[in-house]
Amino acid sequence: MTERLRLSFTALALVAIVVLAYANGLSGGFVFDDQSSVVENTSIRSLWPIGPVLLPPAEAGICGRPFANLTMALNYALHGLDELGYHVGNLALHVFSALILFGFIRRTLLLPALAGRYVADATGIALAVAALWALHPVQTNTVTYISQRVEGLMALCHLATLYSFLRYATSGSRRWAALAVTSCVLGMASKEVMITAPLVVLLYDRTFLAGSMRSALRERAYLHGSLASTWVFLGWLMLHAELAQRGIGFALGVSVFDYALSESCAVWTYLRLALWPHPLVFDYGWAFIRRLTEAAPYLAAIGPLVVFSGFALWRRWACGFLGACFFIILAPSSSIAPIIQQPIAESRLYLPLAAVVTLAVVGLYLLHRRTLWIWTAVALVFATLTSRRNEDYRTPLALWADTVAKRPQNARAHNNLGSALLYAGQPGAAADHFTTALQLQPTYPEPRQNLGVALLRLGRPAAAITAFEAALALQPASAPTLCNLGEALLALGRTAEAVDRYEAALRLDPGHAEAHNNLSVISLAAGRFAEARDHAEVALRRQPDFAAAHYNLGNALVRAGQTAAAIAAYTVALRLQPDLISARHNLGVALLQSGRAAEAATQFRAVLEVKPDHPGARRNLEQTLQSLPR
């Protein structure tokens, strides 16, 4: 078997084991930030004009990351809001990253300075590194969680930059130099951590190729300069990214000192998870360390590693480069620049993990060359744990229940578990978790307004109004809370006050889907059919999968005499929500009006199967059957 064929089989084996490990994660739904990044992200709805795609709004959560947003738009163009396509996209990025890592490690081990020691086993070592990195259970937070595509895309570009640089340095081909710069630019347009790539490339050149910083800059000055120039592009993106909207900045309530202390715990957590991936936590919450004594154990553990990495890097040891990579890539998110919403996030370990895995595999190889069986066993364990962890991402309810079990003091986890229970039709249980969230963090507005929603579902609109007003006292400029307050007022028959709240919500967020949908209902009841249609259509532009808005659009269209269009609207509503009985009944009526009596009868029978006492469906079915030819 030729070397090329052997490498092809090795690559296929790597792809196969990674895909098998993540296969059960492809059926997971949208969770947490996926709502803002995908479901409510209007900038991905069309690929043209390209401007909105490359400059997504701040509320999308992906602002300042045009390449990542473009990939989301491509997904939407191919299959709308079908979660499967987005999961396949994330998995594809992960597989490509693993292949590039495999090629990069292998070619590095075959460099003249290292080949004498590793040439016989370079392919096996590289395969072990790539497989362990790709199968490590902590990677599920980036691969299976759709919104973390930004991390996976950045890592792919980071690795592609390194690999292309290595190919250029060993071949002199300008095409590889161009690819390195292109990858670096695309990485800058994916996530801000890519700022580390030019520095990592320079340190790699110094450690493995040039022998010194001066030689690296002299021999490949143009390419290093070109890579560094991409910082200008990143700076421009960050100026337009509205980072404060994502909870990033120095004036958001957490000092640089407190955040740095907290990140000592974060970095220690990443190291611990790299070596022992348990427990894995989706959301660690907002816990910050405020005193030096609390951080002392973490600083004592990390400090010597940082010092040794610096010393080893100075001596040009390979382990020094790996240690430096770990800390440098983590630095933008885990040093002094506060990220208020997520001081600890397992996705940040995604790329730095490659350095830890490489150090472990190569280190054990140097101790004893026959280690393939060890890494095979570890890979199988990792694959099993990854598959199990994917199950937690199947639904928001499962994910947040797991998070609350592991972090019971996390107020945000309780709030989101309550939201998942509310969506699952369990408002009583949801209210308990919202109450717990408020006990843990009384100034947290979201669970207060969510508690109002739960009370509204429990038939207690007066109590719901109290909760909504308390939430507005904490967060006056909240369109969702104003909209929910309007719904509670409407339930008490206070229609004029409800309209005022809906209109106030629209002043804050002109495209707010719920507010437009509720105004559509009110307009329809008042006989303003064109206005009802317009409100429903605006709601659907923001949220195309909003079944109730499709239903209300159908109602407005029927009243306006547009029966064919109404049938289409009802059909979409039922595709999105098959148990929407009112839409099914009204679809039957519209079909009957269109002379499609047999189809209408089918719809009325379907309504009666679910709700036998539905008076309109029974009466309409009887009339429809009488009109059918015998």
Image (cartoon, helix red, strand yellow):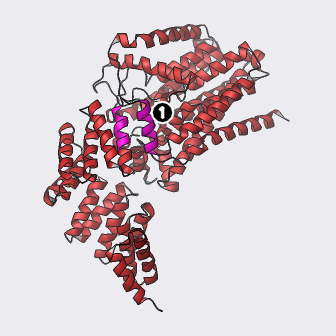
Is 572 in front, or is 159? Answer: 572
Q: Amino acid at mark 1?
A: Met
Q: Is residue 577 left or right of residue 364?
A: left
Residue at 42% from the left image edge and 26% from the top image edge: 344
Nearest to the observer: residue 149 or residue 361: 361
Q: Residues within 10 Å of mark 1 (few under 14, many from 20)?
A: many
Q: Where is mark 1, residue-wise?
A: 188
- Picture mark count: 1
Q: Secondary structure at mark 1?
A: helix
Q: Does the magenta-highlighted stretch encompass residue 83?
A: no
Up the image or down, 261 lies above or below 552; here it is above
Residue 173, position as x, y percentages in the image:
68, 31
- Looking at this rendering, what residue extends furthest in the front direction? 613
- The answer to whether one can see residue 217 in this image is no
Question: From the viewer's perspective, is residue 188 above or below residue 308?
Answer: below
- 417 drawn magenta: yes
Instruction: Looking at the picture, tell me which residue is in the foreground, 164 or 268.
Output: 268
> Horizontally, is 398 left or right of 469 in the view?
right
Residue 127 falls in image quadrant: top right
Quadrant showing the N terminus: top right
Location of residue 400 in the rendering, given as x and y in whole percent from the top left corner = 42, 39
Instruction: Considering the whole magenta stretch, tell me its main secondary structure.
Output: helix
Range of magenta residues? 395-418
When the figure is inspected, residue 555 is found, relative to residue 293, above or below; the finding is: below
Q: Residue at x 29, y 59 (%)?
A: 517
Q: Residue furthest bottom?
A: 630
Residue 9, visible in the rendered structure: yes
Residue 535: x, y in percent? 28, 62
Decide which of 500, 208 is in the foreground and name it.
500
How far from the left and from the top, in percent, is residue 499?
18, 57
In the picture, measured across the screen, residue 172 lies left or right of residue 506, that is right
